[in-house]
Amino acid sequence: MTREYQITVPALLSTILSLVVARAIESESIDTFSLACEGKTLHIGKDRLLLMQMRVSAAINTDPDVIASNEVFAEVLRKAGESSQGNLRVVSPEGNFVGLIAIRELLALVTSSEDLPRVGIAADVCESNSPTLAPDSNLDQALRLMEAEGIEEVPVTVPPDSHLVGLLSRSAIRNALNHAALSMVTVARSDVPIAWSADYRVAQIRVGAGAAGRSIRHLDPRARFGVNIVAIKDADNSTAEFGPADPDRILHLGDVLLAAGSPSSVRSFQRELVTRSTV
């Protein structure tokens, strides 16, 4: 603006110093400060980041209580009395999901002499417009769906026929999160991979000479291998702990990545790095 280019460097230094001081005093920007005062945040927490890395298939109950759509009403009542779940999954003879029967609503139905005569089979009393999830959805999506619908359990189905493969509950998500958080701490202090489930694990991968100078975005492990880099430890700082993985951060020789994915995906990513670097 002034055409005095010799003040460019001092101006940049002043701006950076001002930003550092401002962030030290208040981490929120002028755009997010009012939201923070209301208890809201745009930052993604560590728990949510972990949930976004885990698929629904890693936490489902593959043997939920189900009842055939053509089962007589007396059998529906018997199974409802024996079930420890809040709902009964109704499936077709082929195993495809038909709907849900809320056990708490059966009592109101039984006490209603007006509606009961019209009930013949399970399909007559099930709610067919219930939400479902796909096995490859992540647990963060599942939890947000439960919050939006005000439900505790969600059937997991496979398109296109909505074949029922299991049931996901809030308690299962909580257990998966606790397991993942514990394994993250364990694997951060050890080179031994930790399995989050039968088809998901987290492991350490050390950056070698071939990958040094490149970014995670350039390596693109998610698109190429289905692997997520959830944390990174700086090799230049011997006392550093694992921190969030910035996709644009330039990797250095000896940096350690925490890679999460299915065992085969992690192995493929490791083999890829072996051909380019030392793991």
Image: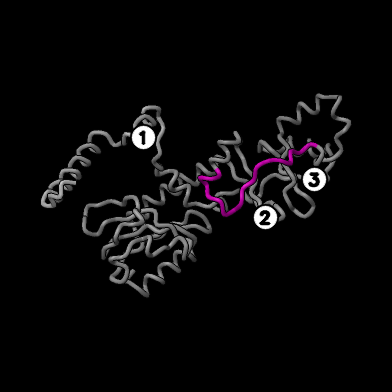
Q: Residue sitting at 72 percent across and 48 percent down?
A: 97
Q: Residue sitting at 13 percent across and 52 percent down?
A: 5
Q: Is residue 129 magenta?
A: yes
Quick check: 193 above or below 127?
below
Q: Residue sitting at 72 percent across and 55 percent down?
A: 161
Q: Which mark is residue 69?
A: 3
The image position of residue 84, as x and y in percent, is 66, 37
Element type at mark 3: loop
Q: Is residue 263 magenta?
A: no
Q: Which mark is residue 96?
A: none
Q: Earlier in the sequence, mark 1 or mark 3?
A: 1
Q: Which mark is residue 159?
A: 2
Q: Which residue is mark 1?
A: 32
The image position of residue 98, as x and y in percent, is 75, 46
> In front of the other: label 1 or label 3?
1
For the residue pair 87 and 144, the one nearer the viewer reads as 144
Q: Which residues are magenta?
A: 125-142
